[in-house]
Structures are given as C-alpha cells and as structure tokens.
Image (cartoon, grey):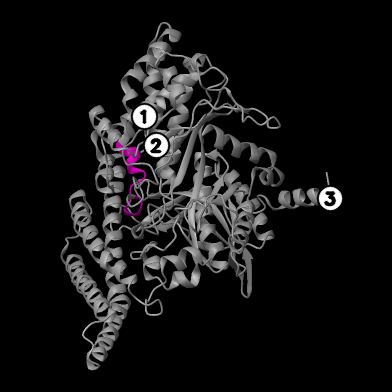
Amino acid sequence: MKKSQKKTQEALAETFGSNVFSDQVMRQRLPQNIYQALHRAMEEGIALDPAAAEVIAAAMKEWAVERGATHYTHWFQPLSGQSAEKQEAFIAPYKRGDVMLEFSGRALIRGEADASSFPSGGLRATFEARGYTAWDCTAPAFLREEPDGIIALCIPTAFCSYNGEALDTRTPLLRASEALNKQALRVLRALGDSETRRVFANVGLEQEYFLVDRGLYRNRRDLVYTGRTLFGANPPKGQEMNDQYYAAMRQRVSGFMAELNFELWKLGVVAKIQHNEAAPSQHEVVVSYDGAVAACDQNQLTMMMLRKVAARRGMAALLHEKPFACVSGSGKHNNWSLGTDRGENLLDPGRDPASNIRFRLFFLAVIAAVDRYPGLLRMISAGLSNDQRLGGHEAPTPLISVYVGEPLLRMLRGGSLTGANGTINSGVSTMPALSQDCNDRNRTAPVAFTGNKFEFRMLGSAQSAATANAILNAIVADELMLVADRLERADDPNAEVQALCTEMFAGHHRVLFNGNCYAQEWQEEAARRGLPCYPTTVEAVSALTEPETAEMFARQHVYSLPELESRAAIGYAAYIKALRIEGNTMVEMQRRAILPAVMRWQGELASQCAGLDATGASNGPQKTELATVTDYTVALYAAVRALENLLATLPEGTDKVHAAQWRDGILPAMEAVRTPCDALEAHMPSDLWPVPTYGELLYHV
C-alpha cells in the first residue's frame, strides 16, 4: 500500500464513528458483565437493570466529557417530523464556589419534555403538559458538535405521553420491528429453519435536495417561510438538456459535499454515494443500508447536517419536495429488504428463483401487503408539499402498483425465467460480459422490486422515514402472520407453501404492473382492476382510521386506535396550516414587494406614453406594453384580494371535511395569483423585479 493510501485510510479510520458511543467504545469502557447485560437487553428485548444503567451512564459521561461535551440531551423525534432535544448541563453545584459533573443512570433512562407543545392530535390537551422520554438502548449515543464550540451528548429516546401513548415516530417503528421479527421467525420455523434468531428490515435511504445561494434564499420570503417558491417564471433553460444529471460537480458544491461527508462519517453515518440529480442545483446523498431504526436515525442526522453545512458555506439546502415549479422535485427513495442475524437476505431470489420457495413466500407476502393496504402506503407520502410532486412525470403516481419485471412475473405465473440472470455483451472485445439482474427497473412505479429489495419511491424528501418503515414493517408482519398460521396448522407444510404461493399470487396479482405508470391507459386499466386511487393528502390520511387498518395495527401492537386518530388529526391539521402559511406568504409578498414594483413599472410606462402623446405620437411599443402590463396587474390585484378573503373566511378544523375545503379553495386561488404574476415577471425590467428569479436561484451556486 502506498504511503498516501495508508495515510488516507488511517485518517478515515480515525474519523469514522469518532463521535459515537459505539459497540467498540462500550466494549473498551464497560465492565464485561455490564457490556453483556446491555447486549442481552438489546438482543432479547428485556429491560436493563438500573444498577447496570448507572455504570453505563458513568462511562458515557466520562467519554463525552473527555471529548469536550458540556451538555447532554434526550434526542427524540416528535410528530412534527423533525428531531427535538432539551439540553442539560453536566455541571451541578457541589460546595460553595465549587461544582461537579454528574450524569446518573436515571438521567440516562428517563427524561421529561413538555408534551403539550408538540403535535399530539388530541392525545394531550394544552393543560396536560407532562411527557416522558425513554432511552432506546438499541441505538448508540453520539456527540453533536457546533461551530461555536458547544458539544452535546445526544441519547436516542422514545417519547410518550403521561398515559403511555406514543407521541413520536420512533416508538411505532420499534413496535413494528418487533412484530416483523416475531411473524417472520414463525414462518422460518414452519419452513424448518431452527437457527435464525432474528429477522429485521434493512433500509437504505436516498436523499435528494437542492442547494441555493444563501443571500438569494434570504431574499425570497416564500423559501424562508414555506420551503418552496410560490412564484417564478420559467428560466430560458431548465433541465431539458439533461446535462445536470451525474455531471461533474461545481466547485462550491464539491466543497460542501466534502464537509458533509466528514460530519456524517464522524457520526457513524456511512454516506456512500453523492451525485448531481436531474434538475439544476439538485443533488443526492445515499447512505448505506442499516437496520430500520438506525437508518431512520441516520436520515434525520443527514437532513440536519445538510442544512447546517450548507449554512456554514453560504448556501441553503432545500428539502421541500417541489421548491421550483419548472423542474423535477425531490424525493427520498426507501429501499427495504429483510435480513437475518445469519447474514441472509430473505428477498434474494438466488440463481433459481423458481425453486427458491422461501424467497417466493416472502416476496409474495410483501406484494400481498401492498395490495391489501394501498391507502397506508399512499398515506406515508402524504403532505401538501409531496402532493405537488407525485404524478408529475418526475415521480411515481399516487396510484399504488408494484413493478417486478417480466421474468419474475412469468415465474409467478408458473413459467420459466428466460431472459433474466444472463449476461450482457457490449460487442467490444476488451470489455467483459456484464451479469444481468433478474429484472429491469421502472422509475414510474410507486413500489419496485429491484433485484433483492423493494424500493418505495413515493416518500418525500423532507419527510421522516420512521413512519413509512413502521407501516411497511407492520403490514408485512400482518401478512406473514397469516402465512405462519396456515403453515403451522398444515399437515404437510411443503404442500401448503405451494398452495399459499398460488393463492397469494391469484389474490393479489392485480397490483402488479410492469408498464408506464404515467400512461392514461394504466389509469383506466387500474380502475378496471379495482385499484383505489388517493390523489391528494385529504384522501390519503383517511386510510389511517379505516376499520381494517385499525384492526391490523391492533393485531400487531403497533398503533392503538387513539394513536391512529391522533395521527389523522395531525395530518389534516398540518395540511391546513401549510396551506394557510403559503396563502399568507403569497399575500404578503404581493402586498409588500411584487405589486408595488409592478405598479411602479406601470406608472413609468404611463409616463413614457404621456411623453409620446406630448410629441404628437399616437402609437408606440410603450402603449402596447402598458396595456399588457395593466391587464396582468388588474388580474393579479383581483386574485390577491380574492385569496385574502378566502384566508379570512375559511373555517378552522382538523378533519377531512375542513382539509378538503381548504384544498378546494386555497389551491385554485393561489394558482390564480401565480399565473398573472409569473407573466408580469417576463415583462418587468430585471432591476425592478423585487425577488431573485428562478434563473438566479438555480444557476448561481
């Protein structure tokens, strides 16, 4: 190995995970009996002895303080979709004029947060403030450094109400992971596997985002308040040349990504892939696979670091699903597979999928779960911002279907696997033959099998992945429970497996579609098949409280009915609040910036026309332009007035009826404002237009 390579490898080894209280650190710092007790708690799902927690807390504090930490916090993920924390100093009074550093086992295990100030959907009233945070010992603590020198020890925790209801996204994911493990093990045992001890979802997340100049960002109130541009005429060039995708990165972006990688690596986040995306100023970072809980934690840290590093470098990271109307929006592809503690992937077809009974059974169980609960899968991508992206010929449609590829579809129908798992010859003698996967890829499908995993493509870039994976784990666990029940009752399990595979395909093949999901023909065919469609968030959120859904979550002990009702209320309330914020921001920008600028230009044109008349000229381009600008200005002013009136009169509420009223009222009213505004931008001198344009935002990085 060359010296430079060795130096790089040593630097990466020293950096990676340096801010994580990892298994290696625990092995070094904890007594062996405490280390083993912690692992038993993690692997067997048993409570940790309080005496052991005291020892772990002492070691954790010592490690953190050695690295400069002054505070600790219970790091949790409330139903706002963000992470939250309340920092407490290690420092404590000791004697007059003296202090000591303390961190007890009780402080590690249990914390308290104001539950009335987070979204609860009715689980907590304003006067009912108490909420608890509880240490999730399966996730490692980590240090978060800030540029000003503050270092805090972050302890991953769950968040619940005084009565024990889950007020976060982590708790249901942990419950669903346990349910998936339980039911998958039952299936494996029925198939004769007595060695596997644990089954878990492996998740890999692809995070898309935009980078814009921070100075331009701060001059767009819509970006600051809503995360997207509410106005903006198309620039002369968008993404039609396809010259941004995978292109060489701009120097400023390359420097940003280098710092982002460094910060993520310190946190033990394996940022593996980075590249330019399809739209100008759009990029992607991909983190390696991990267990579902760890992957969702790492994605929260990735989103946080995207914003922080961008701010340090004079940029803003936009995670909104549709920040610009003229180019592709941003998603977060959720790659999901089933792994075992023996290192096996239960969704790996192997060299001969047709004879791989275990693969076919788990593969069909996922397909059956998707077909049985399409509303829930649409719900995990619900939200005003993601509605603006889905189905726009840049992202999957809101009509749920599964792509498996023609070879696997033929296999499920009882045919051969010809045309798959072969080789591809480029025709160039110096190039090796390429191995062919068992299927192609389909970017228009909401759910796609991509070789040994399912890719759920509808999740929005700003959304928490925890709820999505909790629901995926739960619905697959429920389907596996039905499979296990059949196999355990069967006199001949092998024959029963064959019968099950045949029945599952016959009962759920309607959801399989390998063609273009954007095509109108598919919409018509899907309707003939009886597949439901959830075009907007208003319809999608209602899937949470359907009786069949509530019964399934109760069976798997993932959500109680009050928890489901609370999340539906939060979904509707968030939708209405987002519309209100967007509408008010649009009015403010018009009243305080755009309309005054337009009227100044209108006045200037009128003065020019008066000057023409004074010279005896009866015609001129100024008069034509004045007439055009006046027409658009009148339309714009009337549309702003109408939007103001709607915002003042629409009723408040947190249910489906009120959400539909806001959708059907505000969205058309906002479009009526935007249309003449964007037209006026094309008629205004650039020095008079009061906000940065799309061309400046997309190309000035």
Mark 1 surroundings: few (<14), some (14-19) or many (≥20) residues within 10 A: many
Looking at the image, is mark 3 or mark 1 nearer the viewer? 1
Specify whether residue 106 is in view: no
Local secondary structure at mark 1:
loop
Q: In which quadrant of the rendered image does the N terminus lie?
A: top right
Q: Which amino acid, by three-letter code, is at mark 1? A: Phe
Rendered position, 689 above or below 301: below
Q: Which amino acid, by three-letter code, is at mark 2? A: Ala
Q: Which amino acid, by three-letter code, is at mark 3? A: Lys
Specify whether residue 320 is in view: yes
Rendered position, 363 above or below 268: above
> Magenta span has 282?
no
Residue at far bottom of view: 614
Residue at the disc numbered 2: 445
Please report the bounds of the magenta region as a residue range: 375-386
Which numbered disc flags the more N-terminal residue, 1 or 2? 2
Q: Is the magenta stretch mostly helix, strand or loop?
A: helix
Q: Which mark is residue 451?
A: none
Circles 1 and 2: CB atoms closer than 8 Å: yes
Q: Which mark is residue 3?
A: 3
Local secondary structure at mark 3:
helix
Name the spot of residue 417 as percent of width and height, x first: 49, 17
